[in-house]
Image (tube, rainbow, N blue to C red):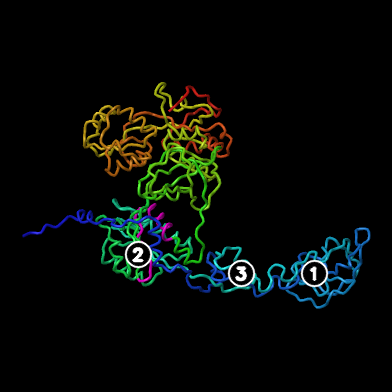
Amino acid sequence: MTTSKRHPIVEARQEQFLNVLDRDAAHERFEAHIDAAPLAAEHVPLDGALERTLAEDIASAVDVPGFDRANVDGFAIRSADTEGASADAPVRLVLNDEVITPGRNPAAAVEPGTATVVATGGMLPRGADAVILVEDTDLDGDEVLIYRSLAPGRFLTFAGADIARGETVLFQGQVIGSREIGVLAAIGMDPVPVVRRPRVAILSTGDELIAPGEPYRTGHIYDSNSHILAAAVRELGGDAAFLGIWPDDEAQLQKQLCAAVRAYDMVLLSGGTSKGAGDVSHRVVNAAGAPGVLVHGVALKPGKPICLAVCDGCPVVVLPGFPTSAIFTFHEFVAPVIRRWSGRPPERRETLEARLPVRAQSEIGRTEYLLVGLVETDDGVAAYPTGKGSGAVTAFSQADGFVTIDAMTGLLEAESTVQVQCIGERRGAADLIAVGSHCVGLDLLLGRLSRDNLSVKAMHVGSTGGLVAARRGECDIAGIHLMDPDSGEYNRPLLTEGLCLVPGYRRMQGIVFRKDDPRFQGLGLDAILRLVCRDPDCMMVNRNPGSGTRILLNRLLGDNRPPGHSVQTKSHNAVAAAVASGRADWGMAIDVVAWKYDLGFVPVQEEHYDFVVPEGRLQRPGVRRLMELLQDPQTRADLAALGLRLDPQENDLEPVAPQRAGGV
């Protein structure tokens, strides 16, 4: 009898997330096996204490200052001797034969009727209780004339006035910054008792990974997760050790993991935690020590495949391979442990109320973190979903915060009020907020604004979304390229009351395809449209609904829906990348992008990419500077070098009345 060998995919399908836990249960199970106390104290040199956490309260062993100190250049005196002194009736005091400079101990006391020369920072001699400014005196032989009366303590600091001996100046758990370094130095503290930094090992896994700096290889991706995680560990007060990229080989990975468990306080693996073929990370954990895997699968989005384990007292966490999933689950499960070990308090995130301008769907049964960008409006704060999935490297870095959608909520309607947890320190409103269609020319302009020390924020939601945002006053500019179906004119007819049009530039939209694809050789636009609508093997890549490119392409296709019509990307570059890699055979993009990817290009229509500005925002510095750049000869030359075409006439910067009501 023969035994058939099952395909690895079949084997993988039989592995399930058998016990997916909710977030709270996963936290409870994981942390029940971890000692959450701060790590032991160690002493480090003062110059190495920056960003470390104090392991104990710090009390001063000295007074600061340690002596009565002059705060100005002048004369040490008895204040009672200056009673009645004025410009018309000065008091005469006999000069003592001494000059006190910093670091010199006075030799003689200040007796009644006498004064001693003292420099700023000098020690006050016995008997003196004030310092008269040199500007309020004159010398007359061996006498000094005093032209004003002083109260006791004037222009001096008494010993211990800043810090008294025995006073607690810093407290356990404080993170040492530059100001704390100054306090520690002032009391002579060196070395400094600090909490030992948690040592966290990071292993990246996957045959597809290559290190940044290596030549790119088709089918591979640069390992970003390990660098994100290492930086996050250091931000929290830990020491991160990157142990390299490891292939999907169970024997090699198990050997390395067992060594890391013995040498480090925590081990993080990135990738290989799902249940697909080739995912091996979660399988090697149990062999690294007891009790092993505690949680494999949490009802979160992003981050369901996370694996939480403890091996012989060392927490081992296998984070998902997708960057946004990895960083979210890191902050959810790993960061709290590192903060406690580092002696730092729990993270406090600012929470604010915002309005969700668009509807957001969620998956019932999983708590979802919806990343959003925040926009200040006259009616409060608007929270725009970033629209990038868990595989996007930039999703977390470009978001201002996130909305937590309950596991039992399947839909948040547009205009819903939501609570946003801010990511990092919330900054003020950007100098220029751009919402709308993406373009390489817009990237250039925003880069120039940033170099002019103006902060910028861009959210690419398509031309229609940008126009709606401008109408609501939720942006400073909306880059759009929308053709009015009645007049054939771009953008201007779609303006409504309160909106202005700042003319931008023109660009050519066309069909892109691989130059070596024989099906497209020598064909014009009409022939290409017939081909793609009839050939079931000719796969297209589309753009997102609401984009000007999608509207134009749908107009060309009519009722036809070629293969791949439902595949939606959010930029011209994404279309070109899909075609260049062979994932799709054709799509629509601008000529500038087609050239960058060395694709064939058949022109369809020259379009106008303009900027819609709410009238009330025309005078904002970012908008004014953008309009100046559009007239700047060097900027215009740089835009032209990208293949974008600018009209020779001056921009019309006056508010434009709508030519017809409604719009899109």
Question: The residue under label 2 is which amino acid type?
Answer: Ala
What residue is shown with label 1? 118
Question: The residue under label 3 is which amino acid type?
Answer: Leu
Front residue of 48/102: it is 48
Q: Which residue lies at the image location 90% right of the left edge and 64% below the top edge?
A: 83
10 Å crowding of disc 2: few (<14), some (14-19), many (20+): many
Q: Determine whether, in the image, residue 604 is placed left or right of residue 345.
A: left
Q: Is residue 332 magenta?
A: yes
What residue is shown with label 3? 184
Tell me where residue 500 appears, x and y as whole percent. Answer: 52, 29
The answer to whether residue 235 is above or below residue 509 is below
Work out whether residue 439 can be spotted. no
Q: Determine whether, in the image, residue 346 is placed left or right of residue 130.
A: left
Tell me where residue 226 appears, x and y as whole percent. Answer: 38, 59
Q: Which numbered disc flags the more N-terminal residue, 2 or 3?
A: 3
Tell me where residue 100 appears, x and y as whole percent. Answer: 79, 72
What residue is shown with label 2? 309
Q: Could you give the CA–CA distance between mark 3 and mark 1, rounded to whole angstroms?
A: 28 Å
Q: Which numbered disc flags the more N-terminal residue, 2 or 1?
A: 1
Tell me where residue 253 appears, x and y as whole percent. Answer: 29, 65
Residues at circles 2 and 1 in contact by the CB criterion of under 8 Å: no
> Secondary structure under badge 3?
helix
Front residue of 110/637: it is 110
Outermost residue toward the right?
89
Residues at circles 2 and 3 in contact by the CB criterion of under 8 Å: no
Please state which of the two labelled residues, at mark 2 or mark 1, is closer to the viewer: 2
Write the start and end of the magenta stretch as one range. Answer: 312-334
> Secondary structure under badge 2?
strand
Q: Which numbered disc flags the more N-terminal residue, 3 or 1?
A: 1
Q: Which residue lies at the image location 41% right of the left edge and 54% below the top edge?
A: 328
